[in-house]
Image (spheres, helix red, strand yellow):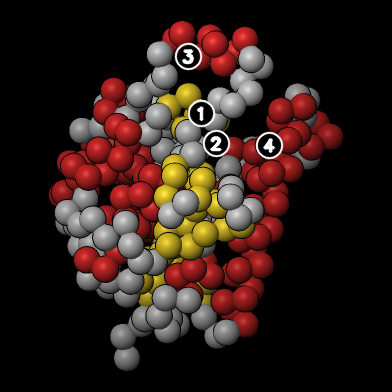
Amino acid sequence: MDRKIGIVFSSGFFGFFAHGGFLAGVRELGLRPVAFSGASSGSILAAMAACGMSDEQIREALFSLKKEDFWDPDPWYKVLAASLRFLKGYTGYLRGSRFQKLLEKHLPVRSFEQCPLPLAVVATNISLMREEVFTKGDLIKAIAASGAVPGLFKPVQYRGWLLVDGGVSNKAPVEAVLDLTPLDTIIVHFVASATLSADDNNPLNRKFTPFQIHRCAFDIGRYECYRRQCQMARDRGVKILEINSESPAVGPGTLHRGPLAYKRARDATLSILPDLLS
């Protein structure tokens, strides 16, 4: 009997390059997932997969990306004025309009209902103080909200709510894909947070700043949430497989690393996943 496989793409700053390589590896192995979920950068690849984009189309969209395609900061005088108010009332540096236009350019669908396969996109609902899981409606708005990194992007206004990065409340939405359709296996492509992937795992040997302490505690909370979701899935009889391809980090100023991150994730998936599935 064919496996009923769900795929989870975790959050991870510009991790969509690695996610794209992972997806290519999954397809090369002949696997045909039946549902997808994603948070933050992972929501982009989850949508591309659920709507049926080919590997070639995905590579074209990712490898052609330039900073100016999504970088739309407020004018300097608005930032200065906000600084003089100690940033009170200032919700983010990038407006997000270019990001949404970029999604409209590359995604062949506009709604969840148009996707051939079930899809869940996670955002963080500031208005209602909870995680928000989208499975219907405006796909572009949902992804834009899921990728709205707090402080960098302004919150996305949708359905009367203020929404920000889904990775804040749920780094790897296992439960979301589990609720879409019956599954017997979930494969998670997990882009580890920097604070949880350091070579030196003894915190007593590290010199922290207050910001690093805050970030580390935040990442630990997200990882614990992920672990609990994985255990819940196992309790339901669903097998959890995790791929951490350890691809090089990519950011707005290092987009040239994207193809390498893609290749390493693809190669890691082709090397690791067959043994996990056996």
Q: Residue at x 42, y 19 (%)?
A: 74
**Location of mark 3 (residue):** 78
- N-term-proximal mark, 1 vs 2: 1
Q: State left or right for residue 261 relative to residue 249.
A: left
Q: Label 2 is placed on what type of residue?
A: Pro
Q: Position of residue 101 (x, y in %)?
A: 25, 38
Reading the image, the residue beneath label 2 is 150
Front residue of 231/165: it is 165
Which residue is located at x 71 percent, y 30 percent?
212
From the image, which quarter does the N terminus lie in? bottom left
Q: Are marks 1 and 4 in contact (CB under 8 Å)?
A: no
Which is nearer the N-term, disc 3 or disc 1? 3
Question: Foreground residue, 36 or 152?
Answer: 152
Could you tell me if residue 246 is visible in this image? Answer: no
Pick whichever of labels 4 and 3 is earlier in the sequence.
3
Residue type of the residue flagged with mark 4: Arg
Is residue 3 visible from the viewing direction of this image? Answer: yes
Q: Secondary structure at mark 4?
A: helix
Which numbered disc, 3 or 1, marks the residue closer to the eye? 3
Residue at the far right: name it: 204
Task: Give the amino acid at mark 3.
Answer: Lys
In three-dimensional space, the C-alpha distance between marks 1 and 2, rounded to whole angstroms, equals 7 Å
Residue 83, which numbered label? none
What residue is pinned by disc 4? 215
Give the residue drawn at x 66%, y 16%.
Answer: 86
Q: Residues within 10 Å of mark 3 (few under 14, many from 20)?
A: few
